[in-house]
Amino acid sequence: MDGDFRTEFVRRRAEGGKHSALVLNADYRPLSYYPLSLWPWQEAVKAAFLERVTILAEYDEVVRSPSLEIRIPSVVVLKDYVKPQKRVAFTRFNLFLRDEFCCQYCGARGDLTFDHVVPRARGGVTSWENVVAACGRCNLRKGARPLHRSGLSLNRPPRQPEAEKLRNIGRKFPPGYLHESWMDFLYWDAELEA
């Protein structure tokens, strides 16, 4: 990843996410990449006040109470390590993330649904190993037929993803806005420019 890629995703903040704080685990990695682990500024200030986090970066803006003034945190790190989950829940979102938000038959992106490789009408089960992301066109084309009779083929066989692999796939899909103070913590293992 080069510097242009990183800065390409620094956007003007949306009003709804104004002054969110990036939340890092005690190992200085985000709790999650997709969705990105963010707290509203109020939660970040509360956690800092309760000494549950250390503030690593701040916005220029401050909030005040009658007895306290604090700059709004933009990056916080938890003082206690939260062990990441090893098991990945079988959800539509995680399925789309595993398949990188593209149809596993034609590679199209966008309006996705999911498809049973072995149709349920033929005994197929709803599991990581039998369900893939599919565009509406390919899903209709395949219908309830077996894969070999549909004229379609899979780009890659469906498998249950490991939690760490799914987190790494999530890094490929940054949100529409990334504050510049977050960049060093999101892409710390990216190749540096010479």
Image (cartoon, rainbow, N blue to C red):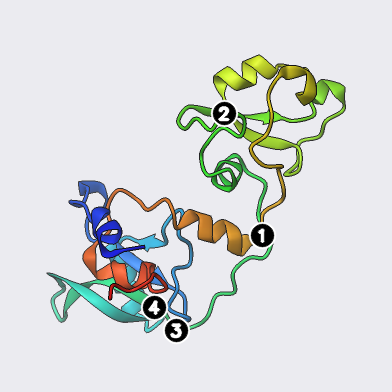
Between residues 157 and 33, which one lies in front from this camera angle?
Answer: 157
At horizontal 46% and vertical 75% (from top left) the residue drawn is 25
**Dot in front, 2 or 3:** 2
Q: Which mark is residue 106?
A: 2
Q: Position of residue 163 (x, y in %)?
A: 62, 61
Q: Quadrant of residue 92?
A: top right
| Residues at circles 2 and 4 in contact by the CB criterion of under 8 Å | no
**Dot in front, 1 or 2:** 2
- Determine the CA span between mark 3 and mark 4: 6 Å
At horizontal 45% and vertical 73% (from top left) the residue drawn is 29
At horizontal 39% and vertical 78% (from top left) the residue drawn is 77
Q: Position of residue 33 (x, y in %)?
A: 45, 59
Q: Earlier in the sequence, mark 2 or mark 4?
A: 4
Q: Which residue is mark 1?
A: 162
| Residues at circles 1 and 3 in contact by the CB criterion of under 8 Å | no
Q: Amino acid at mark 1?
A: Glu
